[in-house]
Image: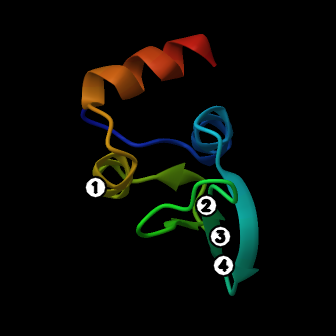
Amino acid sequence: MAKSIPLSKYRKFLKAMGLKHIRTKSSHEIWDNPDNPLLRPITVDSKFSDVPITHIHTSLKTLGISKSEFEEKLKDL
C-alpha cells in the first residue's frame, strides 16, 4: 500500500468498520462509532478527492488494525 485511495472508497471502508459520519466542520468530516466511541475520532478532509496514505496510516492506528487487514477489507468493498 503505497498510494492514496479515492475518498468514496475510504468512506465505504469507514462504514464497514462500523463508523458513522457524526458531523462536518468546514471541509473536515468527523467519523466515530456512536455505540463504542474511539479514543480519537477519525477526521477526513473532504475537499480532496483522494485520501493520502499518511492519513490512512493514522486512522489504522486509531482503529487498531493492520495494513494487511485494511487491504483485505478494501478488496471486499
Q: CA distance from mark 1 to mark 3?
A: 17 Å
- At x 48%, y 61%, the residue is 38
Q: Mark 4 or 1 closer to N-term?
A: 4
Picture layout, residue 24 above or below residue 26:
above
Would you call the spot at circle 4 few (<14 residues within 10 Å), some (14-19), or many (20 or more)?
A: few
Mark toward the start of the polypeptide (2 vs 1): 2
> What residue does disc 1 label?
54
Q: Residues within 10 Å of mark 1 (few under 14, many from 20)?
A: few
Q: Label 2 sits on what residue type?
A: Asp
Give the residue pinned by disc 4. 27
Give the quadrant of the N terminus: top left
Q: Secondary structure at mark 1?
A: helix
What is the spatial separation of the Cα atoms under label 3 and label 4, in whole angstroms?
7 Å
- Disc 4, SS: loop
SS for callout 3: strand
**Badge 2 vs badge 1, beta-carbon distance below 8 Å:** no
Dot 2 alpha-carbon crowd within 10 angstroms: few under 14, some 14 to 19, many 20 or more:
many
Residue sitting at x 68%, y 54%: 35
- On the image, which quarter does residue 8 sit in? top right
Q: Which mark is residue 29?
A: 3
How much space separates mark 3 and mark 2, taking CA atoms?
10 Å
Residue on which disc 2 sits = 32
SS under mark 2:
strand
Q: Is residue 4 visible?
A: yes
Q: Nearer the viewer, mark 3 or mark 4?
A: 3
- In front of the other: label 1 or label 3? 3
